[in-house]
């Protein structure tokens, strides 16, 4: 399974709407941060295994798509951090993890 990258507010609004039908996972990633690089590797490792098929997986590059990243933080009332993984259900944050807590094992425990 793969993740999709979003870059526009319209794409973000679509994800929020879709979260009423199925879970949505967002990974906020910084291309200049080694901890984010590790989080992305963990995210991809989870997706290469047997990820929950009832969830959509998305990536937001926080530097390149700053307005989207800021809007996510505002809409979900979550302090911006990077890397940051947020699991959304019914237009609300269900779970979030940051920095070294974004691991395949942690994702498996929460999402599966």
Image: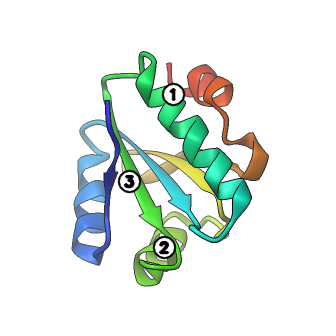
Colour scheme of the picture: rainbow
Say if mark 2 contacts mark 1, CB within 8 Å.
Answer: no
* Looking at the image, residue 16 lies above or below residue 94: below
In the image, residue 50 lies at what x, y percent? Answer: 42, 16
Q: Residue furthest right?
A: 100
Say if mark 3 contacts mark 1, CB within 8 Å.
Answer: no
Q: Which residue is mark 1?
A: 46
Residue at the image position 31 percent from the left and 64 percent from the top: 6
Residue at the image position 57 percent from the left and 41 percent from the top: 41
| Of marks 2 and 1, the one in the foreground | 1
Residue at the image position 51 percent from the left and 27 percent from the top: 46
Say which element carries label 2.
helix
Q: Nearer the viewer, residue 111 or 2?
A: 2
Left/right placement of residue 53 relative to residue 73 reads: left
Residue at the image position 45 percent from the left and 18 percent from the top: 49
In space, the residues marked 3 and 1 are separated at their CA atoms by 23 Å
Check disc 2: other Cα within 10 Å, few if <14, some if 14-19, many if 20+.
Answer: many
In the image, residue 40 lies at what x, y percent? Answer: 56, 47
Q: Which residue is mark 3?
A: 91
In the image, residue 20 lies at what x, y percent? Answer: 28, 44
Q: Nearer the viewer, residue 45 or 109?
A: 45
Q: Nearer the viewer, residue 55 or 36?
A: 36
In space, the residues marked 3 and 2 are separated at their CA atoms by 16 Å
Say which element carries label 3.
loop
Chain-order first, disc 2 or disc 1: 1
Residue 69 image label: 2
Say which element carries label 1.
helix
């Amino acid at each position: 399974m793969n993740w999709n990258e979003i870059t526009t507010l319209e794409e973000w609004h679509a994800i929020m709407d879709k979260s009423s039908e199925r879970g949505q996972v967002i990974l906020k990633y910084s291309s200049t941060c080694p901890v984010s690089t590790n989080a992305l590797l963990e995210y991809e490792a989870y997706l290469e295994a047997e990820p929950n098929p009832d969830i959509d997986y998305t990536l937001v590059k926080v530097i390149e798509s700053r307005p989207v990243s800021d809007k996510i933080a505002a809409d979900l009332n979550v302090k911006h951090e990077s890397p940051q993984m947020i699991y959304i259900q019914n237009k609300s944050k269900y779970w979030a993890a940051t920095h070294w807590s974004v691991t395949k094992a942690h994702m498996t425990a929460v999402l599966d």
